[in-house]
Image (cartoon, rainbow, N blue to C red):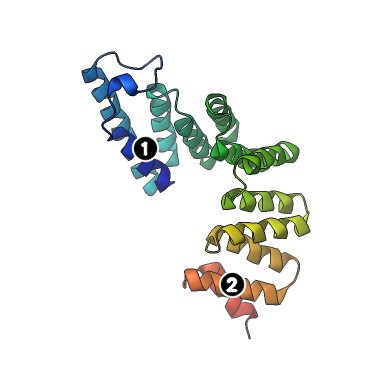
């Protein structure tokens, strides 16, 4: 998530003139208005990050409403608004945000993946799989999409495919803690103690105090 805010700040702090900015119903018509708009947007992004840092995702949702009013043509902002709504368990409100992001940019990989996660959370698995397939069609090297697809296969009780997706995710990003934890959970479900312990060891090599991995090592290690 920090990559998104870093990118947004770099964009806002760039030397781009108002004439180069994408047009929208709220695009200011003078340099002074353009600067005020950029300053307000920048301030909102910082407020959102601060709200997330303190765990106040409801506040972040309210702030994102203002962001998407100021920059309605940004698929990134619509997508991030959807992600924030989903974290508040407001999935029905998140889905239209992803749809708006994809209307603005049909090739927005993160929006496709995020929509898939939201749909899977609603147990709309066939729709979720289509979103993941589209995301991987656009970017087959996205390790997090492979991880999310693995989670969807677990929900569908297709553990063989789940393992394949986790392994592909780790092939692309061997240090992904999310995927390693999911793979460890897979080994636990299939009662593969050796695989579970070796994955736990990979996790603690990255994060020595990881509570779940340490618990598995203490409980099942020799």
Q: Quadrant of residue 43?
A: top left
Rendered view: 53 above or below 40: below
Q: Which residue is mark 2?
A: 200
Of labels 1 and 2, the one closer to you:
1
Camera-side residue: 85 or 113? 113
Specify which label sits upstream in the sequence, 1 or 2. 1
| Left or right: where 114 falls relative to 47 | right
Q: Residue 171 in the image: x percent, y percent?
A: 61, 61
Q: Is residue 89 visible?
A: no
| Left or right: where 203 falls relative to 19 | right
Residue 8 badge: 1
Q: Residue 136 in the image: x percent, y percent?
A: 64, 44
Image quadrant for the C terminus? Answer: bottom right
| Left or right: where 75 falls relative to 193 | left
| Left or right: where 210 falls relative to 55 | right
Q: Residue 205 in the image: x percent, y percent?
A: 50, 73
Q: Is residue 205 visible?
A: yes
């Amino acid at each position: 998530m920090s990559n998104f805010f870093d990118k947004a700040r770099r964009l806002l702090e760039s030397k781009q003139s108002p004439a180069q900015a994408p047009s929208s119903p709220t695009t200011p018509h003078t340099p002074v208005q353009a600067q005020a708009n950029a300053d307000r947007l920048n301030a909102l992004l910082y407020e959102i990050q601060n709200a997330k840092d303190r765990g106040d995702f409801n506040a972040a949702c309210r702030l994102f409403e203002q962001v998407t009013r100021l920059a309605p043509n940004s698929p990134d902002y619509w997508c991030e608004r959807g992600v924030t709504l989903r974290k508040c368990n407001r999935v029905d409100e998140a889905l239209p945000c992803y749809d708006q992001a994809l209307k603005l940019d049909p090739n927005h990989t993160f929006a496709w993946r995020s929509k898939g996660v939201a749909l899977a959370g609603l147990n709309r698995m066939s729709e979720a799989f289509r979103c993941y397939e589209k995301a991987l069609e656009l970017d087959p090297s996205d390790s997090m999409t492979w991880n999310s697809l693995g989670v969807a296969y677990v929900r569908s009780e297709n553990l063989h495919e789940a393992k394949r997706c986790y392994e592909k995710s780790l092939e692309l990003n061997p240090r992904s803690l999310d995927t390693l934890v999911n793979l460890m959970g897979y080994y636990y479900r299939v009662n593969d103690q050796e695989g579970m312990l070796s994955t736990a060891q990979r996790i603690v090599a990255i994060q020595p105090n990881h509570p779940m991995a340490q618990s598995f090592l203490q409980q099942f290690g020799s």
